[in-house]
Image: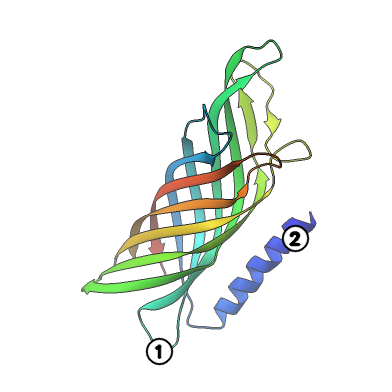
């Protein structure tokens, strides 16, 4: 709970600092895939992923090109794979990981035509696991993804994205690559790719 409180406080401080400047904000959503990469990922496959969130943009002083990109997202990650039961049967397992995610990125906007801009963004993100279930095919009961015997709640990594802005409509693609292991003693990390759409206010 302390980590969650710290994460929420950091999010509010970031948004509060942003609000003191020439703030531009948007709502966005996306769908795509997520998986794990690294050691201990043999036999795993990508699964459906999604996100919804609020984005905040703070232009740097004296420029219409560079900006600080932040916000708060609710995002799903996870993986599909094979597990071994007590009877040594191989079964399909789906692990769903739900996070609150705080991006802390720098954006560069290229003005190409009237009402059409191209935005590149990249930088770190911080995330905290708030829910999710692990499901084994053929077993009705689901296990909590996070917890004492589950995955680590904290996630951090690098986010990259490119977006096409048509007036107030924003269409883009983005990826997230974790630098934090999903569990103690494991060599697996989160990886995701999403297609997004948003609206600027």
Element type at mark 2: helix
**Mark 1 closeness class: few <14, some 14–19, many ≥20 residues within 10 Å:** few
Q: Which mark is residue 26?
A: none
Q: Contact (CB < 8 A) between labels 2 and 1?
A: no
- Displayed quadrant of residue 199: bottom left
Q: Spatial distance from mark 2 to mark 1, Cα to Cα?
A: 35 Å
State the image coordinates of residue 17 (x, y, percent, origin top left): 60, 78
- Residue 171 at x, y = what percent? 33, 57
State the residue in front, 58 or 156.
156
Q: Which mark is residue 62?
A: 1
- The image quadrant of residue 110 is bottom left
Q: Helix, strand or loop at disc 1?
A: loop
Q: Is residue 167 visible?
A: no
The residue lying toward the viewer, choosing from 23 and 117, is 117
Where is the N terminus found, in terms of image quarters? bottom right
Question: Relative to 180, is 42 on the left or the right?
Answer: left
Q: Is residue 59 above or below residue 150?
A: below
- Point 55% across, 77% down: residue: 18
Indicate left or right for 56 with 88 as reference: left
Q: Measured from the top left, where is residue 193 in percent x and y?
A: 43, 47
Which residue was labeled with disc 2? 5
Earlier residue among tags 2 and 1? 2
Q: Residue at x 58, y 17 (%)?
A: 91
Q: Colour scheme in the image? A: rainbow
| Residue found farthest to the left | 113
Quadrant containing the C terminus in the rendered view: bottom left
Q: Give how far across and how far down residue 145 sits, in percent.
A: 67, 37
* Disc 2 residue crowd, few under 14, some 14–19, many 20+, Cα 10 Å: few
Look at the image and tell me whether residue 131 can be seen.
yes
Q: Is residue 133 above or below residue 190?
A: above
């Amino acid at each position: 709970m302390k980590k969650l409180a710290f994460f929420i406080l950091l999010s509010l401080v970031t948004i509060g600092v942003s609000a003191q400047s020439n703030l531009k904000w948007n709502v966005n959503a996306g769908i795509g895939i997520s998986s794990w990469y690294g050691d201990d990922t043999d036999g795993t496959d990508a699964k459906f992923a999604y996100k919804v969130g609020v984005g905040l943009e703070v232009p740097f002083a004296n420029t219409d090109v560079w900006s600080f990109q932040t916000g708060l997202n609710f995002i799903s990650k996870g993986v599909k794979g094979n597990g071994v039961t007590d009877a040594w049967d191989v079964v399909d397992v789906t692990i769903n990981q739900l996070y609150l995610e705080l991006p802390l990125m720098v954006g560069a906007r290229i003005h190409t035509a009237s009402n059409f801009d191209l935005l590149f963004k990249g930088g770190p993100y911080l995330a905290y696991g708030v829910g999710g279930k692990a499901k084994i095919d053929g077993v009705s009961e689901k296990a909590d993804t996070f917890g004492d015997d589950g995955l680590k709640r904290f996630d951090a990594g690098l986010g990259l994205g490119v977006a096409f802005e048509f007036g107030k409509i924003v269409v883009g693609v983005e990826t997230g690559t974790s630098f934090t292991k999903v569990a103690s003693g494991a060599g697996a990390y989160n990886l995701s790719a999403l297609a997004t759409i948003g609206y600027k206010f």
